[in-house]
Amino acid sequence: MDIAGDFLPPTIEWFALSPYIALVAGALILLLGSLTPQWPRGWYGLVSATSAGVAGVLSVLQFANLADELPRTLVKGALAHDRFGLLALIAICVAVVFTSMTTVDADTSDSLEHFALLLTAALGAAIMVTANDLVVSFLGIETLSLSLYVLAASDRRRSASQEAGLKYFILGGFASAFLLYGIALVYGTTGQTSISGIGSTLAGEVSVPRNDAMLLAGVALLLVGFGFKVSLVPFHSWTPDVYHGAPTHVTGFMASLGKVAAIVALVRLFVVAFPTRADDWRPAVFALAVLTLLVGSVLAIVQRDVKRMLAYSSISHAGFMMVGLEAAGRIGSSSASDGVSSALVYVVLYSVLAVGSFAAVSVVSQHASDVTSTSEGQSTTSLDAFNGVAKTNPVFALGFTVLLLAQAGVPLTSGFVAKFGVIRAAVSTESYVLAVLAMVSAVIAAYLYLRIMVSMWLSVPASGEATSALAPKLSLPLRVTLVSAVAITLVLGVLPTWLLDVSDSLALFAR
Amino acid sequence: MELVVFVLASAMMLVGALGVITRSNPVHAALSLILTLFGVAVHFVALEAYFLAAVQIIVYAGAIVVLFLFVIMLLGVDKAEDLATEPLVAQRWLAGIAGLGLLGLLVVAVSRGVEVLRPRGNGLDTAAQGADGDANIQQLAQSVFGDYVVAFELTSVLLVVAVVGTVMLARRRMAGEA
């Protein structure tokens, strides 16, 4: 019988898939390195930064091309090719380039596996932000999460790192089970896994069935699963411990990549697949946003350790992104698409801030462990380690201050553009309660960033030995990372016109 | 008949799954896993997906669980370990109540949602292919290399990540390194 005749191969647009291919190729080249003698120091990081850079440039080209083309899906609807996903993909590539450069400097991790896992994590995140099928999305989540579990446990000298990896692994596996059950229930009711397909099936029904419990249970379980990955408040308890235990450059990577991927996947899923059920999921998103904003910022200010502070502040940032999703859920309003684009812009700008801030923290903690012979268990990232940093290295302190001001949302920084965007979306969809709460929590969180700044600029070092001779040493890649993060923060803060121009096209999903 | 097979296979799966998490001896837990995987295979047979059922037995119940047993024997963790620590006593009760509540909600949601099931994908179209013994394999290939080719390729990346991660965590620190 005719064997090959029936098979219809899917059309594959290789250029549109090239960013993913670049990321995988980089990981495979690195893994080939295990057959050769150890490469010279820094080469692994160079390969990883280069392949992420190539992937980033390719996504920028496609982002530009989409000005004339319509958003579409690739490979039988598995991946979406739209500006919403591509902007997130660009942010992911930037985060990988920055992290590769900061990792080169961390003396613990000059191993090829470390950089290969950075690239596979980026691939998982890239798949998540563009997946148009729940099966593909789930595989992306698992690829990202598995890489992050191992990276979190990668510092074998500190038991806190091992604990962080194990804790993240067990809780993450639990959350994945929720996600998978949610996917199963949604598939059970709609009969398909394609995100845009679910949307059109639900939109095509004549009237909303009176008994919709199975679908809504699936949506709720999906929200729980994604809520864990984003670290929304009832599902946040892993965040401070894991962020604190993981090596600092990995923490920045987790904060930026994990947030970008999970928020973008969540927004795409809810806005494309379940707009007809927006009245059902919006109150849940509202409650999560309120809890996340308040608990995140209040718990952030009582911490004594800078990494834990920034972990709680990342939770509070997730609350702001939920404000954007809540606005996107007001389907009837003409400003609902503002909610979509503002949540995306927020998470993209936050990813740069997160990588930059944690890179700065790693500089100080490296310095602290060099100066004082710390014993195991004594943290090198406590607030005291930042005392008087400005006196020994004012330029570095200034850069870190800019990043912190941006996280606080001070005007002329990208953080202001981000916060202004989501709050404007909330106000224009008449979600005033949420807008006010978001502003209150921004004020509460500002105290936290001020505490770090006061410690850097006004406090004297605890030990008198910290003279300028012992100023934090910054290697060239670390300098480049910090300078570029600060530059992006300031340029997009002072001249946000480009972002505002494209923001309308961001909400056009491929269907 | 169909109902009887379904109930029996499901019972096998549930008993096996409970065994995996409650047996304190890891060898018994691994053997319970075989029961679960066997139940899945029975479900596949009931759905006329004979090829998948065979693969399920050979790959999962055969190869993978045997690998588990090898690891258990090589690492020498064949004894039961007492992991009972109870820092927060109330937590267990709260977790139990929350778990039962979630279970109840899901059972109600699924049982009432049966009325509104929408038509689903074709799955394995065994009726059309009839007596052709290769029909199963062809349709599987169509799914794996056609409709779900991205997911299929991504799975290979996921497996690479698992291998690389294991190597990275298990490798002993070499003498030269700090």
Image (tube, coloured by chain):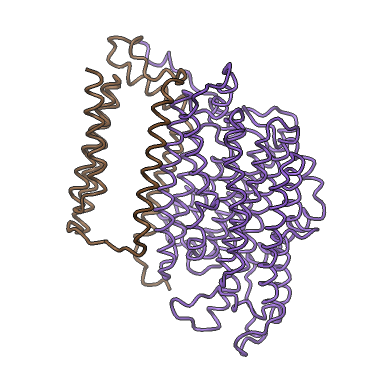
Chain colours: A purple, B brown
Q: Position of residue A474 (x, y in %)?
A: 63, 72
Horizontal side of A64 relative to A361 (left or right) equals right
Residue at point 43%, 77% (across, down): A376
The residue lying toward the viewer, choosing from B167 and B66, is B66
Question: Looking at the image, which residue sits at the far bottom?
Answer: A464
Q: Is residue A436 shown to the viewer in this render?
A: yes
Direction from residue A79 to residue A166 in the image, left or right: left
Q: Closer to the camera, B132 or A324? A: A324
Number of marks in the rendered image? 0
Q: Residue A196, image x and y in percent?
A: 57, 27
Residue B1: percent from left, percent from top: 21, 17
Please state the horizontal and vertical placement of residue A48, each as a whole percent of the image: 55, 53
Image quarter of the N terminus of chain A: top left
> From this viewpoint, is residue A484 visible?
no
Rendered-image quadrant of the C terminus of chain A: top right
Q: Residue drawn at (79%, 45%), measured in percent from left and top?
A: A498
Displayed quadrant of residue A406: bottom right
Residue B162 vertical position relative to residue A217 in the rendered view, above or below: below
Residue in the picture at 67% in, 85% down: A460
Name the one closer to the observer, A392 or A47: A392
